[in-house]
Image (cartoon, rainbow, N blue to C red):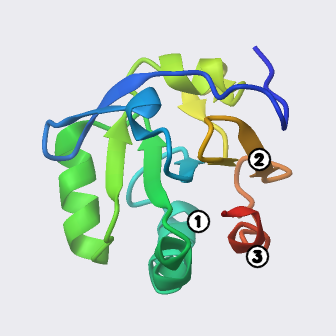
Amino acid sequence: MSIEVGQDAPDFTLQNQNREEVTLSGLRGTPVVLVFYPFDFSGVCTAEHCEIRDDYKGWIEQGAEIFGISRDSIFAHQAFKEQESLPYSLLSDMKGEVAQLYGTWNAAVAVAERLTVVIDREGKIAYMTRSGALPEARDHSEVLSHLS
């Protein structure tokens, strides 16, 4: 499946690191940033999450909810979140079903490729950025300008 700016964001429900369910449609009225990534604790993923952590204040000042999404378990997410002091939830997509909805599942290696999606208050995709290749970090410099 492929997604595009302007379309409704595909709805989903996933568990976070605390076993709490998060349903995207339940967040309407709030801008949401979904950060798909391959693995907790890997070098590039850790660097990207630390960058988001360090820029977090600017993102939440715009009212945004941020969620990291990977195929890792809730237990791995809890340890990663604690180790890196991440102030946002990490959602477990162990079968890659949500990554498939967003067109970022790489079946050959069974991971989500790097994709960041900004969803506006009405539930529409406002902005997307992805890395050029799996081991490359993506550029989050424009995310803040698309939060409103």
Name the kind of residue labelled 2 in the image. Ala
Comparing labels 1 and 3, the label whose residue is closer to the camera: 3
Q: How many marks?
A: 3
User: What residue would you read off at disc 1?
Assistant: 44
Write the residue at 53% across / 44% down: 38
Give the image location of residue 124, x and y in percent.
70, 35
Write the residue at 57% across / 69% down: 48
Give the image location of residue 131, x and y in percent.
79, 53
Neighbourhood count class around disc 3 (C-alpha, 10 Å): few under 14, some 14–19, many 20 upward: few
Label 2 SS: strand
Write the residue at 27% across / 64% down: 81
Give the image location of residue 82, x and y in percent.
20, 69
Sooner in the amino-acid sequence: mark 1 or mark 3: 1
As drawn, 26 above or below 119: above
Quarter location, residue 47: bottom right
The quarter of the image holding the N terminus is top right
Work out how far the residue at label 3 is from the one at label 2, CA to CA, in angstroms.
Answer: 15 Å
User: What residue would you read off at disc 2?
Assistant: 126
Name the kind of residue labelled 1 in the image. Val
Sooner in the amino-acid sequence: mark 2 or mark 1: 1
Comparing labels 2 and 1, the label whose residue is closer to the camera: 2
Neighbourhood count class around disc 1 (C-alpha, 10 Å): few under 14, some 14–19, many 20 upward: some
Give whichever of 137, 12 is nearer the camera: 12
Write the residue at 52% across / 21% down: 11
Neighbourhood count class around disc 2 (C-alpha, 10 Å): few under 14, some 14–19, many 20 upward: many
User: What residue would you read off at disc 3?
Assistant: 141
Name the kind of residue labelled 3 in the image. Ser
